[in-house]
Amino acid sequence: MHLVECSNITKIYQSGEVSVKAIQDVSFTVDESSFVAFVGPSGSGKSTLLNMIGCLDPPTSGTLKVAGQNISDMGRSRAAAFRGENIGFVFQDFNLIPVLSVFENIEYPLIMVQNWPKARREKQVNELLEAVGVADQANKFPRQISGGQKQRVAIARALVTNAPLVLADEPTANLDRKSAERIIDLMKKMRDEFGTTFIFSTHDPRVVKNAEIIFTLEDGCLISQEDSKRGNHV
Ligand SMILES: Nc1ncnc2c1ncn2[C@@H]1O[C@H](COP(=O)(O)OP(=O)(O)OP(=O)(O)O)[C@@H](O)[C@H]1O
Protein backbone atom coordinates (compact mmCIF):
# COMPACT_ATOMS: atom_id res chain seq x y z
CA MET A 1 0.00 0.00 0.00
CA HIS A 2 1.15 3.55 -0.67
CA LEU A 3 1.89 5.42 2.53
CA VAL A 4 2.64 8.68 0.71
CA GLU A 5 0.99 9.72 -2.56
CA CYS A 6 2.15 13.00 -4.01
CA SER A 7 0.36 14.17 -7.18
CA ASN A 8 1.45 17.24 -9.14
CA ILE A 9 2.63 19.14 -6.09
CA THR A 10 3.84 22.70 -6.53
CA LYS A 11 5.07 25.01 -3.78
CA ILE A 12 5.52 28.71 -4.34
CA TYR A 13 6.93 30.92 -1.60
CA GLN A 14 5.73 34.47 -1.91
CA SER A 15 7.48 37.31 -0.14
CA GLY A 16 6.29 40.70 -1.33
CA GLU A 17 6.88 41.02 -5.06
CA VAL A 18 9.20 38.03 -5.20
CA SER A 19 7.94 34.51 -5.68
CA VAL A 20 10.10 31.37 -5.52
CA LYS A 21 8.89 28.15 -7.08
CA ALA A 22 10.54 25.76 -4.61
CA ILE A 23 8.75 22.61 -5.89
CA GLN A 24 7.39 22.25 -9.41
CA ASP A 25 4.78 19.69 -10.42
CA VAL A 26 6.27 16.78 -8.48
CA SER A 27 4.56 13.36 -8.36
CA PHE A 28 5.68 10.15 -6.66
CA THR A 29 4.52 7.44 -4.29
CA VAL A 30 6.21 5.79 -1.33
CA ASP A 31 5.11 2.36 -0.14
CA GLU A 32 4.77 1.28 3.48
CA SER A 33 8.02 0.14 5.16
CA SER A 34 10.22 1.89 2.59
CA PHE A 35 13.65 3.40 3.12
CA VAL A 36 13.83 6.45 0.91
CA ALA A 37 16.31 9.28 0.30
CA PHE A 38 15.72 12.65 -1.35
CA VAL A 39 18.95 14.05 -2.74
CA GLY A 40 19.87 17.13 -4.76
CA PRO A 41 21.93 20.29 -4.54
CA SER A 42 21.37 22.98 -1.96
CA GLY A 43 18.14 24.84 -2.72
CA SER A 44 16.69 22.03 -4.86
CA GLY A 45 13.62 21.74 -2.62
CA LYS A 46 14.35 18.78 -0.31
CA SER A 47 13.35 20.47 2.95
CA THR A 48 10.33 22.10 1.32
CA LEU A 49 9.09 18.70 0.20
CA LEU A 50 9.72 17.05 3.57
CA ASN A 51 7.91 19.90 5.32
CA MET A 52 4.87 19.37 3.10
CA ILE A 53 4.84 15.58 3.63
CA GLY A 54 5.13 16.31 7.35
CA CYS A 55 2.05 18.57 7.33
CA LEU A 56 4.17 21.52 8.44
CA ASP A 57 3.44 23.58 5.36
CA PRO A 58 0.69 23.03 2.74
CA PRO A 59 1.41 22.77 -1.00
CA THR A 60 0.34 25.68 -3.22
CA SER A 61 -1.32 23.19 -5.58
CA GLY A 62 -1.55 19.45 -6.12
CA THR A 63 -2.69 16.63 -3.87
CA LEU A 64 -0.73 15.04 -1.06
CA LYS A 65 -1.97 11.98 0.78
CA VAL A 66 -0.33 10.39 3.80
CA ALA A 67 -1.71 7.16 5.28
CA GLY A 68 -4.76 7.52 3.03
CA GLN A 69 -5.63 11.03 4.28
CA ASN A 70 -5.59 14.04 2.02
CA ILE A 71 -3.31 16.44 3.88
CA SER A 72 -3.08 19.09 1.12
CA ASP A 73 -5.72 21.35 2.59
CA MET A 74 -5.93 20.38 6.26
CA GLY A 75 -6.36 23.25 8.69
CA ARG A 76 -3.62 23.92 11.27
CA SER A 77 -5.19 22.13 14.22
CA ARG A 78 -6.15 19.02 12.24
CA ALA A 79 -2.68 18.99 10.72
CA ALA A 80 -1.11 19.14 14.20
CA ALA A 81 -3.26 16.24 15.43
CA PHE A 82 -2.50 14.24 12.28
CA ARG A 83 1.24 14.84 12.75
CA GLY A 84 1.08 13.72 16.36
CA GLU A 85 -0.55 10.43 15.38
CA ASN A 86 1.27 9.62 12.16
CA ILE A 87 4.62 11.33 11.75
CA GLY A 88 7.89 11.38 13.65
CA PHE A 89 10.63 13.91 12.91
CA VAL A 90 14.42 13.71 13.10
CA PHE A 91 16.46 16.88 12.51
CA GLN A 92 20.12 17.49 11.70
CA ASP A 93 20.72 19.39 14.94
CA PHE A 94 18.91 16.70 16.98
CA ASN A 95 16.44 19.17 18.62
CA LEU A 96 16.53 17.52 22.03
CA ILE A 97 15.20 19.47 25.00
CA PRO A 98 18.29 20.35 27.09
CA VAL A 99 16.57 20.37 30.50
CA LEU A 100 15.05 16.92 30.05
CA SER A 101 16.93 13.65 30.50
CA VAL A 102 17.35 11.18 27.64
CA PHE A 103 14.44 9.15 29.05
CA GLU A 104 12.23 12.26 29.36
CA ASN A 105 13.07 13.46 25.85
CA ILE A 106 11.86 10.17 24.40
CA GLU A 107 8.80 10.16 26.66
CA TYR A 108 7.82 13.73 25.77
CA PRO A 109 5.58 13.03 22.71
CA LEU A 110 3.65 10.42 24.67
CA ILE A 111 2.74 13.03 27.28
CA MET A 112 2.28 16.04 25.02
CA VAL A 113 0.68 14.44 22.01
CA GLN A 114 -0.88 11.17 23.06
CA ASN A 115 -1.37 11.32 26.81
CA TRP A 116 -0.51 7.68 27.51
CA PRO A 117 -0.76 6.45 31.14
CA LYS A 118 2.54 6.35 33.08
CA ALA A 119 3.12 2.58 33.17
CA ARG A 120 2.50 2.20 29.44
CA ARG A 121 4.77 5.16 28.71
CA GLU A 122 7.62 3.73 30.77
CA LYS A 123 7.40 0.35 29.06
CA GLN A 124 7.41 1.94 25.61
CA VAL A 125 10.31 4.31 26.38
CA ASN A 126 12.39 1.49 27.90
CA GLU A 127 11.82 -0.66 24.82
CA LEU A 128 12.98 2.14 22.55
CA LEU A 129 16.00 2.98 24.71
CA GLU A 130 17.06 -0.65 24.23
CA ALA A 131 16.19 -0.72 20.52
CA VAL A 132 18.37 2.29 19.67
CA GLY A 133 21.19 1.26 22.03
CA VAL A 134 21.15 4.08 24.59
CA ALA A 135 19.56 2.34 27.60
CA ASP A 136 22.70 3.04 29.63
CA GLN A 137 22.36 6.80 28.94
CA ALA A 138 18.73 7.10 30.09
CA ASN A 139 19.38 9.43 33.03
CA LYS A 140 21.92 11.68 31.32
CA PHE A 141 21.10 15.05 29.79
CA PRO A 142 21.69 15.87 26.10
CA ARG A 143 24.84 17.91 26.87
CA GLN A 144 26.39 14.79 28.46
CA ILE A 145 26.14 12.49 25.41
CA SER A 146 27.79 12.38 21.97
CA GLY A 147 26.28 13.57 18.67
CA GLY A 148 25.67 10.00 17.51
CA GLN A 149 23.97 9.18 20.81
CA LYS A 150 21.84 12.35 20.53
CA GLN A 151 20.66 11.27 17.10
CA ARG A 152 19.81 7.80 18.48
CA VAL A 153 17.69 9.49 21.15
CA ALA A 154 16.02 11.63 18.47
CA ILE A 155 15.21 8.49 16.46
CA ALA A 156 13.73 6.83 19.54
CA ARG A 157 11.62 9.95 20.15
CA ALA A 158 10.41 9.88 16.53
CA LEU A 159 9.40 6.22 16.88
CA VAL A 160 7.89 6.33 20.36
CA THR A 161 4.31 7.05 19.25
CA ASN A 162 4.38 4.12 16.77
CA ALA A 163 4.02 6.60 13.90
CA PRO A 164 4.08 4.81 10.52
CA LEU A 165 6.27 7.53 8.96
CA VAL A 166 9.52 9.16 10.10
CA LEU A 167 10.88 12.18 8.22
CA ALA A 168 14.54 12.95 8.71
CA ASP A 169 15.97 16.19 7.30
CA GLU A 170 19.74 15.73 6.86
CA PRO A 171 19.94 13.38 9.87
CA THR A 172 23.68 12.79 9.48
CA ALA A 173 24.82 16.33 8.60
CA ASN A 174 26.35 16.97 12.02
CA LEU A 175 27.90 13.54 12.49
CA ASP A 176 31.29 12.09 11.59
CA ARG A 177 31.37 9.38 8.93
CA LYS A 178 31.26 6.40 11.30
CA SER A 179 28.42 7.82 13.39
CA ALA A 180 26.55 8.73 10.18
CA GLU A 181 26.78 5.16 8.91
CA ARG A 182 25.66 3.80 12.28
CA ILE A 183 22.65 6.14 12.30
CA ILE A 184 21.62 5.00 8.82
CA ASP A 185 22.04 1.35 9.86
CA LEU A 186 19.94 2.04 12.94
CA MET A 187 17.12 3.63 10.92
CA LYS A 188 17.13 0.63 8.60
CA LYS A 189 17.04 -1.75 11.57
CA MET A 190 14.10 0.16 13.01
CA ARG A 191 12.35 -0.06 9.66
CA ASP A 192 12.87 -3.85 9.67
CA GLU A 193 11.74 -4.19 13.28
CA PHE A 194 8.75 -1.82 13.37
CA GLY A 195 7.80 -1.55 9.67
CA THR A 196 8.24 2.23 9.89
CA THR A 197 8.78 4.10 6.62
CA PHE A 198 11.81 6.41 6.71
CA ILE A 199 12.12 9.31 4.29
CA PHE A 200 15.26 11.36 4.64
CA SER A 201 17.02 14.13 2.78
CA THR A 202 20.76 14.17 2.47
CA HIS A 203 23.76 15.63 0.68
CA ASP A 204 25.98 12.83 1.84
CA PRO A 205 26.87 10.30 -0.89
CA ARG A 206 27.95 7.76 1.74
CA VAL A 207 24.47 7.88 3.17
CA VAL A 208 22.69 7.89 -0.18
CA LYS A 209 24.03 4.49 -1.18
CA ASN A 210 22.19 2.91 1.75
CA ALA A 211 18.78 4.05 0.59
CA GLU A 212 16.57 1.61 -1.30
CA ILE A 213 14.82 4.32 -3.27
CA ILE A 214 16.60 7.53 -4.25
CA PHE A 215 14.66 10.51 -5.57
CA THR A 216 16.77 13.28 -7.09
CA LEU A 217 15.53 16.86 -7.08
CA GLU A 218 16.95 19.71 -9.12
CA ASP A 219 15.54 23.24 -9.16
CA GLY A 220 12.35 21.95 -7.54
CA CYS A 221 11.77 19.22 -10.14
CA LEU A 222 12.00 15.49 -9.62
CA ILE A 223 14.57 14.45 -12.21
CA SER A 224 15.11 10.78 -11.36
CA GLN A 225 14.01 7.87 -9.23
CA GLU A 226 16.33 4.94 -8.60
CA ASP A 227 14.75 1.92 -7.02
CA SER A 228 17.17 -0.84 -6.06
CA LYS A 229 14.32 -3.37 -6.19
CA ARG A 230 12.61 -2.24 -9.37
CA GLY A 231 15.32 -0.57 -11.50
CA ASN A 232 15.68 3.06 -12.49
CA HIS A 233 13.20 5.43 -14.02
CA VAL A 234 12.57 9.13 -14.36
N1 LIG B 1 10.29 30.17 3.76
C1 LIG B 1 10.78 30.42 2.55
N2 LIG B 1 10.52 31.58 1.91
C2 LIG B 1 11.00 31.85 0.67
N3 LIG B 1 11.79 30.98 -0.02
C3 LIG B 1 12.11 29.81 0.57
C4 LIG B 1 11.62 29.47 1.87
N4 LIG B 1 12.09 28.23 2.19
C5 LIG B 1 12.82 27.82 1.13
N5 LIG B 1 12.83 28.77 0.15
C6 LIG B 1 13.49 28.66 -1.16
O1 LIG B 1 12.97 27.50 -1.80
C7 LIG B 1 14.01 26.81 -2.50
C8 LIG B 1 14.14 25.39 -1.95
O2 LIG B 1 14.65 25.44 -0.62
P1 LIG B 1 14.83 24.16 0.30
O3 LIG B 1 15.25 24.62 1.65
O4 LIG B 1 13.64 23.30 0.20
O5 LIG B 1 16.06 23.41 -0.43
P2 LIG B 1 16.97 22.22 0.09
O6 LIG B 1 17.15 21.31 -1.10
O7 LIG B 1 16.41 21.62 1.31
O8 LIG B 1 18.32 22.98 0.40
P3 LIG B 1 19.49 22.59 1.46
O9 LIG B 1 20.09 21.31 0.94
O10 LIG B 1 20.44 23.75 1.35
O11 LIG B 1 18.86 22.48 2.81
C9 LIG B 1 15.26 27.66 -2.35
O12 LIG B 1 15.35 28.51 -3.47
C10 LIG B 1 14.99 28.46 -1.08
O13 LIG B 1 15.68 29.69 -1.11
Image (cartoon, rainbow, N blue to C red):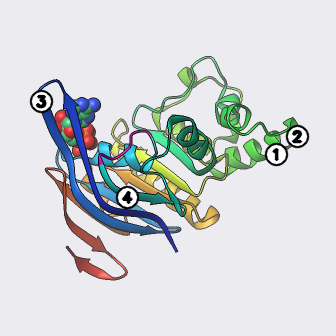
Q: Residue 200 in the image: state x and y as whole percent.
A: 39, 52
Check if mark 1's residue and mark 2's residue have beta carbons within 8 Å: yes
For mark 3, give the secondary structure.
strand
Q: What amino acid is labelled 1 in the image?
A: Lys
* Label 1 vs label 3, nearer the camera: 3
Check if mark 4's residue and mark 2's residue have beta carbons within 8 Å: no
- Asked where in the image residue 91 lies, by quadrant, the reply is top left
Q: What amino acid is labelled 2 in the image?
A: Ala
**Sequence-first tag of 1 and 3:** 3
- In the displayed orientation, state which residue is furthest to the bottom: 230
Q: Residue 99 in the image: state x and y as whole percent.
A: 62, 17
For mark 4, give the secondary structure.
strand
Regarding ligand 1, which quadrant of the image does it lie in? top left
Q: Residues within 10 Å of mark 4 (few under 14, many from 20)?
A: some
Label 1 to label 2, Cα distance in Å?
6 Å
**Sequence-first tag of 4 and 1:** 4
Q: Main secondary structure of the magenta part?
A: loop
Q: Residue 75 in the image: state x and y as whole percent.
A: 50, 39
Q: Which residue is nearer to you in this view: 204 or 137?
A: 204
Q: Residue at x 74, y 49 (%)?
A: 127
Q: Residue at x 11, y 26 (%)?
A: 17
What residue does disc 4 label?
63
- Asked where in the image residue 38 lies, by quadrant, the reply is bottom left
Magenta stretch?
A: 56-60
**Sequence-first tag of 4 and 3:** 3
What residue does disc 2 label?
119
